[in-house]
Amino acid sequence: MEEYQRSGTAAAGQQPIIEIIEMHKWFDDFHVLKDINLQVHPQEKIVICGPSGSGKSTLIRCINRLEEHQRGSIIVNGTELTRDLKNIEKVRTEVGMVFQHFNLFPHLTILDNLTLGPIWVRKMPKKEAEELAMHYLEIVHIPEQAGKYPGQISGGQQQRVAIARSLCMKPKIMLFDEPTSALDPEMIKEVLDVMVDLAHQGMTMLVVTHEMGFAKTVADRVIFMDFGEIVEENEPNEFFDNPRHDRTKLFLSQIL
Amino acid sequence: MNTMESSREIRPPSNNVGVVGWLKHNLFNGVFNSIITLVVLAVLIRVVPQFIQWAFIDAVWFTSGKECHEASGACWSVVTKNIRFNIFGYYPYDQQWRPLLAMLLLVGMLAYSRDWKRWNKKLGYGWLLALFVMGVLMKGGLFGLEPVETTKWSGLPLTLLLSFFGIAASYPLGVLLALGRQSDMIIIRSLSVVYIEMIRGVPLITLLFMSSVMFPLFLPEGVTIDKVLRAQAAIILFTAAYIAEVVRGGLQAMDKGQYEAAESMGLNYYQTMRLIILPQALKIVIPPTVGILISAFKDTSLVVIIALYDILNTTKSILNTPEWTGFSTEAYIFIAIVYYLCCFSMSQYSRRIEK
């Protein structure tokens, strides 16, 4: 992965595109997220890391309301997430999500996986949606697989399709929930390369990952979470070279 | 000749291939299996020739009932001589071409629809038209066709009618109930649960009785609802509850990630269900669903109890006439074959759709 010019910090003066204020979440009695405060600016790339069970996945799943928070507020691109279904659907069309297990629709071809959102949510004519889908398949380097079913391609290819599927909705923000954790080692790079390209093009990205190489090259900020709290956040060089908290130090010593 | 064949390749030992190999592998594979094979063979040798003697060699085919009583073999005349009554029942004799045509139309439409790649809007309209034509053929009163009361509908057309509409209507109803049972809305969920559990707690016969005997008591005087229609409703309501539980199983088998992926794209509930969840869930549950539909088909014979003359009941009427008393074996074998053909076609049909 090559070095590239970070853009996020330069945009710090702008209005944040995601604003999380004093947010708490419980699973029944279990306090899974505690007093989360986070601002994300347009084009910023944020990597979230932490031990398993620290609430990092839950945090980004709250941003498109796959999980409901119980206290505080989350405002995404000017829309506050409440129980209002209209607002939730509006936010979801603006936020793309890539899952650990790809979650492609196995009964549809790759092309149909990609055109589904544009056709049914954006009400785009079929032909136009297919052109759009092919465009994004080319961006993730697998246009030749368009006619196949998800089960017929490799994990790395499936994840790239999943990224293309999200991009077809022309999202303003992309969430990645451990996008490479379920992949065989030789396929991780092809997915990370696509994500780096995306970062270059100025996408706002929140990435939950343990790929510290990716964090170092792409992230504007790295956030470390533990026990449902944001323990430390810093720009990557500082984060990796001079971690301030003991928990961060311990975590980094375990994964690096 | 065979230059491609490697010189290293030799033929397998002769007792591993061919007839001997097959016998050894499938019939005499160990002491226990050998004993079973011999026992089964002994039973077959005793039973099969005797059955052939009775069913074919000594059998009479087109005689009167009297001659039948003198014959030592099977009396297939009970079937052949009464075939029209057996199949069409009390439908007016000179009009019986109409239910015949309706049934052929139904079978033709089903045969054409067996490949799901042909399922499109046009085929949907084709079905609507076909159903309309079948209705007109059966009921009459239009296009100069003599009207025929539904009380006279009987035999195989009645069986097929009750099963076809029973299946066609209970399936979507069952899917809706399954979705209702999974719903977040508590009222819808409780209603679905109560409905499903109540219906499953009651035998079909009870429902048929209620629909034919008790239900009319609640109607205002002068209002009557067709008896066939009432039986049909009972069958639909009954089957739907069972379909609902099977479909619920399919919905629960779905990976949560599928819901999340659909939702995170901004699809709403109906789109998520229609485009993502149901196509996969319903496919998973095709085998148990077909089991339910087949038993629904066979259960239509219970309408005997409310004095509708389906194909089983017309057979009984024939056997009640003095001329044909005592030939129930032959008559029921024939009915069994009819039922078997229908049920077997259903399971073959579902396998095609499963692909």
Image (tube, coloured by chain):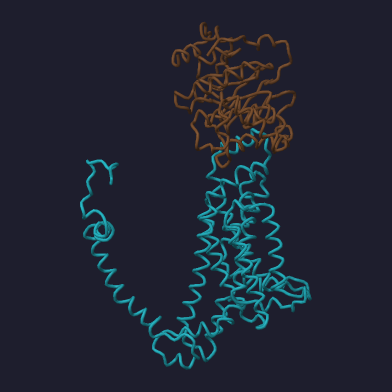
Classify residue B34 as left or right of residue A85: left
* Depth order, front residue of B271/B12: B12
The chain coloured cyan in the image: B
Considering only vertical position in the picture, is A80 above or below A151?
Answer: above
Q: Quadrant of the C terminus of chain A?
A: top left
* Depth order, front residue of B126/B304: B126
- Residue depicted at x 27% and y 72%: B42
- Choose top left, top right, bottom left or bottom right for residue B97: bottom right
Query: Percent x, y for residue B46?
Result: 29, 77
* Depth order, front residue of B258/B90: B90
Classify residue B329 as left or right of residue A88: left
Please name the color used to draw chain A.
brown
Query: Percent x, y for residue B219?
Result: 75, 71
Considering only vertical position in the picture, is B135 above or below B256?
Answer: below
- Choose top left, top right, bottom left or bottom right for residue B228: bottom right
- Residue depicted at x 64% and y 64%: B165
